[in-house]
Amino acid sequence: MTLSLHGLPVARGIAIGRAVLVVSSRLDVAHYFIQPWEVDAEIGRLRTARDAVSQELVRLQASVSQMTREETPHELAALLEVHQMLLQDEALTEGVKHWISERLYNAEWALTTQLEVVARQFDEMEDPYLRERKADLEQVVERLLRQMKGTAAVLAPTPPPRRARTEGDEDEGDGFDAPLVLVAHDLSPADMLQFKKSVFAGFVTDVGGKTSHTAIVARSMDIPAVVGARSASQLVRQDDWVIIDGEAGVVIVDPSPIILAEYGFKQRQGELERERLWRLRHKPAITLDGEPVELLANIEMPEDSEAAVKAGAVGVGLFRSEFLFMGREARSLTRLPDEEEQYAAYRRAVDGMRGMPVTIRTIDIGADKPLDGKGSKQEYLNPALGLRAIRWSLAEPAMFLVQLRAILRAAAHGPVQLLIPMLAHAREIRQTLALLEQARAELRGQGIPQGEVKLGAMIEIPAAALMLRVFLKHFDFLSIGTNDLIQYTLAIDRADEAVSHLYDPCHPAVLRLVADTIAECRRQGKGVSVCGEMAGDVQFTRLLLGLGLRSFSMHPSQILAVKQEVLRADSGKLAPWAQQVLDSDDPAELLGA
Ligand code: PEP
Ligand code: MG
């Protein structure tokens, strides 16, 4: 039966494919793809774990049989027998083997996927006794997972998520070759990074806001994505056909042939539009009245510089360095990258940009970007208002110095700008500058080459936007992080879909802070750019140009669409209109947003 679900559109385009469900449960397991030649070893890991659990159960049964009736209830022995039966059950073992060999899931992922399939069958049983066996099955799977812990292979860096077609495979119209779309309750930014190199054609998550970091990474992958689709992961089943309309924020499950044809048509239209935009990539971004506009890229990993150059970016306006630090435990790496590892990564980005400037933002960890890749909400009372970004760096000065040294060293190889996130206090500025000076002096003292860096601050907290005078005394340029500026101005958690309707980039207070920051920087002859999602949203290009902005930083995938707007704009004519928008009680109406 066709079902349509509504969420928040985060990355444009249409994806049509088979659902890959990443089960989010108390069974917190790694999800990654293995190589085709690792299938046997992965099934072997599972078999070893099953044998170990079986022996564990036999031992338990033996000790139970030696106890008196008073010591142990008769049900316990029966229960252990049920667990042994479930462990050997073909529905579980054959199913797990299927996910490993057909989809190249790692054993833990295959196990939790099959658990979900079988658990649904239990849910549908009429007999309450049998229905309750679901909990036993979960316990058995937990035992297996515990056994497998520590036996996982290191993550495959470039996972090929499709089984190679072998002789005798027929195209049975079963969607064997269909694209895959990922459906999950939630995905941490670290999970997303892990999936970044895979071939998923789209994403759907139950939770998340439009500018949550998970959404931002989805956008950087330039594939259709919908977040905040509430119960999508409950309603979509493994292997269901799914359409993701990333523009409308709609997910259609099990579509009829007519709907499929309609979306197939839309998908082709989108591809044609992209091809048309692609022709603009070498064209300089200059408005109709001759104003040059700098279009920069936001990147998460050094390798993203390739996409940035391809899309015609004239530099990197935001390298979110924290992605080098995230999800490392899942990849069996030490907790934090050392100076050499960081230096090598920053240098790769600098080299990749071939002489164009690279703006490296110091680590912005915390809130919805926890270091270990797991949700942080349960650990802190209010993570978005907690120890994140520069606050965390200043609380960990040894780590911060390592990062500053690595960035200064990379600056010896090309133009680098250093950007500090989430500053709000003059004291924090002073502490940051002192640590930067210390890093410089250390390198000088050790005779290690370093380069000059331009120093910038992000304007993300209203307090910062209201004390520009102090910021401009110390910094060469400012970069407006609208994602956080909106979150903190309107007191809306950007990752919470329950309040996403109140997350409003057009709010007059937000526009006022953005406008004043641009105007003050221009007045003082300092550089200013916007690197939040607003910069890549074509709805706001004309307004930002009208407010005097000449530097936009966004995901490479958004650059050409924004360039098209720039080429069509007359900045002189836009200026008075932008003032009208600023003065309006309802800017969204004037913007047509
Ligand atoms: C922002 O807040 O707008 C920004 C660019 O930083 P991040 O999205 O990484 O918090
Ligand atoms: Mg931010």
Image: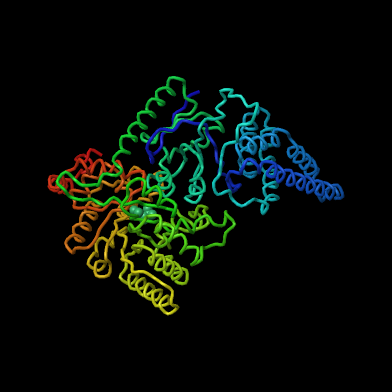
From this view, report whether residue 398 is shown above or below residue 480: below
Left or right, residue 6 beside residue 173: left
Residue 477 pos. (x, y %): 27, 62
Q: Please identify the quarter of the rendering in which residue 288 is found.
A: top left
- For ligand 1, give the image quadrant: bottom left
For the C terminus, give its image quadrant: top left
Please provide percent x and percent y for residue 416. 35, 63
In this rendering, the answer to whether 92 lies above or below 513 is above
For residue 529, above or below residue 119: below
Which of the 4 image quarters holds residue 162?
Answer: top right
Q: Is residue 191 left or right of residue 300?
A: right
Residue extending farthest to the top is 258
Number of numbered tags placed on the structure image: 0
**Horizontal relation, residue 562 to residue 524: left or right:** right
Q: Is residue 382 visible?
A: no
Q: Residue at x 18, y 48 (%)?
A: 546
> Which x, y percent locates residue 178?
52, 30
Within the image, what quadrant is residue 409 found in?
Answer: bottom left
Q: How is the image coloured?
A: rainbow
- Taking the view exactly as shown, the residue that stands out farthest to the bottom is 445
Q: Is residue 60 visible?
A: yes
Q: Between 567 and 106, which is closer to the camera in this rendering?
A: 567
**Residue 536 pos. (x, y %):** 31, 46
